[in-house]
Image: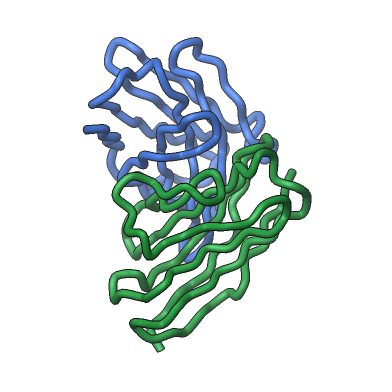
Chain colours: A blue, B green
Amino acid sequence: QVQLVQSGAEVKKPGASVKVSCKASGYTFTGYYMHWVRQAPGQGLEWMGRINPNSGGTNYAQKFQGRVTMTRDTSISTAYMELSRLRSDDTAVYYCARGVGGLVIYWGQGTLVTVSS
Amino acid sequence: EIVLTQSPGTLSLSPGERATLSCRASQSVSSSYLAWYQQKPGQAPRLLIYGASSRATGIPDRFSGSGSGTDFTLTISRLEPEDFAVYYCQQYGSSPTTFGQGTRLEIK
């Protein structure tokens, strides 16, 4: 069965960077886009961008352009999302999610990133 | 980008009642590429409906979706206790994909 297992919770100081991993199993990693979606405490869902694991090509939401980098390592079926220059309003749960085009079907368990001085 | 507005913000109903949730788009959603998700506290969202009206695998038939263009509806025919959650719509026909702000379905 499809599984997306994310790395553990992180606490970072403002201005730092965070890198979240997402290990995929149960399907052909290079066959489907991987999306990243975040959810601030008590708030809704916000799409950050996606990566094509086959080509490495990325599409980022304009809001995160210049601060987010999505990469992948096909040898270990793992996708990564790095967010730099963290601010307090980046505190959120970050999800990876397997997509068919823009439709998101399978979600990881989420990674809480807390930004605090 | 397409803005999705969900209404109502909160819906208070009793088990056994019918729930109707609305999602309105700021412009037409291409090819009815509209999805609905359910999210319970502490959990990731779960896909319920895609293509405006197709149920995802394993979703009970009390959930149904309808609509086209700019107006979409999620209907839960008879509420079960486990249906009380937050529901989000998403359009995935235009880039960037966008989500609505959510409707909280609570027990009356």
Considering only vertical position in the picture, is A107 above or below A79?
below
**Horizontal side of residue A58 vs A77, given as left or right:** right
Q: Residue at x 36, y 15 (%)?
A: A73
- Please state the horizontal and vertical placement of residue B67, each as a whole percent of the image: 63, 56
Considering only vertical position in the picture, is B10 above or below A17?
below
The answer to whether residue A117 shows anywhere in this view is no
Q: Nearer the viewer, residue A111 or A74?
A: A74
Considering only vertical position in the picture, is A114 above or below B80?
above
Q: Residue at x 53, y 78 (%)?
A: B10
The number of numbered discs placed on residues in the rendered structure image is: 0
**Horizontal side of residue A48 vs A117, given as left or right:** right
Q: Nearer the viewer, residue A25 or A40?
A: A25
Write down the quadrant of residue A26 in the picture.
top left
**Horizontal side of residue A68 vs A66, given as left or right:** left
Quarter holding the N terminus of chain B is: top right
- Please state the horizontal and vertical placement of residue B71, each as a whole percent of the image: 69, 59
Q: Residue at x 45, y 75 (%)?
A: B105
- Please state the horizontal and vertical placement of residue B63, each as a whole percent of the image: 41, 62
Q: Residue at x 47, y 25 (%)?
A: A33
Quarter holding the C terminus of chain B is: bottom left
Q: Nearer the viewer, residue B52 or A21?
A: B52
- Please state the horizontal and vertical placement of residue A71, each as a whole percent of the image: 46, 20
The answer to whether residue A11 shows anywhere in this view is yes
Write down the quadrant of residue B57 in the picture.
top left
Residue furthest bottom as drawn: B108
